[in-house]
Amino acid sequence: MIPMLIVYGAYTHKGKVRKRNEDYFYIPNKTKGVEDIAMVADGMGGHNAGDLASRMVVEHILEYFYQHKNNIKSIDDVRDAIHQAMQNANQKVYEYSITDAMYSGMGTTLTLAYFFEDTVCIGHVGDSRGYIIREGELKQITKDHSLVQELLENGSITPDEMQHHPQKNVITRALGTDKHVRIDYYEVKMQPNDALILCTDGLLNHVNIEDKIEFIMSNRLPQHIAEKLGEKALDGGGIDNITVVVAKYLNGAEKR
């Protein structure tokens, strides 16, 4: 198996309209000591303590993977760990939400990517998204848990109408709003030069990622890619919090 090197970058901003940033993200760093995982979370707008919910979920999941990292030895172990970590985080936020009326209804989306050998394993709840760009083509990995997605699937609206629908921000599934949560899980075999994009809907309000494929594929620095995509969303209006994580999967032999 060809050794792979994963390089990460991230950008987050509260945008031009919101008073605070309810998004939260993680990419590997020395402080947390958790490798091979990246996450984006979007605290539920219009609900109490969305910023707290997104941070709690990410931090609880990091704690779980740190405690269990030595037990993850196969893809099956990764799948089970993702489900258990997300369920545990869901329970923590839900239990916190019922301690005080000011936290009632708090919740968050989460899109999580765990890299294991040549596979990226995705855990997903809500309408943040995960994309893969390979050989100049963009593919959306995750499916939104949103009202407009349901309307699209039953034929009530078209893809073009989704973007401007008055209820486009209504999500149908989130972490922390109920005792239990259904988690979507995906696996994608990675190839050298693949780029993985995780983002909240604040980016997608203003940036068509498909239009940026050439820029993403030609730039080797994920941090630069993330910053430029985020700044593009900000320049486009920044009506929501903006968060994007970029991970590039490189041939290990290319490491400098």
Image (cartoon, rainbow, N blue to C red):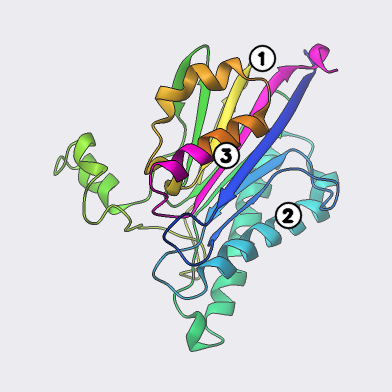
At label 2, which amino acid type do we have? Leu
Which tag, 1 or 3, sits closer to the chain's start? 3
Identify the residue at horizontal 52%, vertical 11% (top origin).
Answer: 135
Distance CA(mark 1)–CA(mark 3): 18 Å
Report the magenta residues as a range.
231-256
* In this rendering, the label closer to the viewer, 1 or 3: 1
Q: Nearer the viewer, residue 256 or 65?
A: 256
Residue 151 in view of the camera: yes
Residue 116 in view of the camera: no
The correct choice, above or below, for 7 with respect to 255 in the image is: below
Q: Label 1: few (<14), some or many (≥20) within 10 Å?
A: some
Q: Quadrant of residue 218?
A: top right
**SS at mark 1 in the image:** loop
The location of residue 131, given as percent across then percent down, is: 49, 31
- How many numbered marks appear? 3
Q: Label 2: few (<14), some or many (≥20) within 10 Å?
A: many
Q: Is residue 237 magenta?
A: yes
Q: Which mark is residue 192?
A: 1
- Residue reaching furthest to the front: 235
Dot 2 corresponds to which residue? Answer: 62
The location of residue 111, given as percent across then percent down, is: 54, 46
Distance CA(mark 1)–CA(mark 2): 27 Å
**SS at mark 3 in the image:** strand
**SS at mark 2 in the image:** helix
Q: Quadrant of the N terminus?
A: top right
Q: Nearer the viewer, residue 255 or 179?
A: 255
Dot 3 corresponds to which residue? Answer: 122
At label 3, which amino acid type do we have? Ile
Which tag, 1 or 2, sits closer to the chain's start? 2
Identify the residue at horizontal 51%, vertical 68% (top origin).
Answer: 50
Which tag, 2 or 3, sits closer to the chain's start? 2
At label 1, which amino acid type do we have? Pro
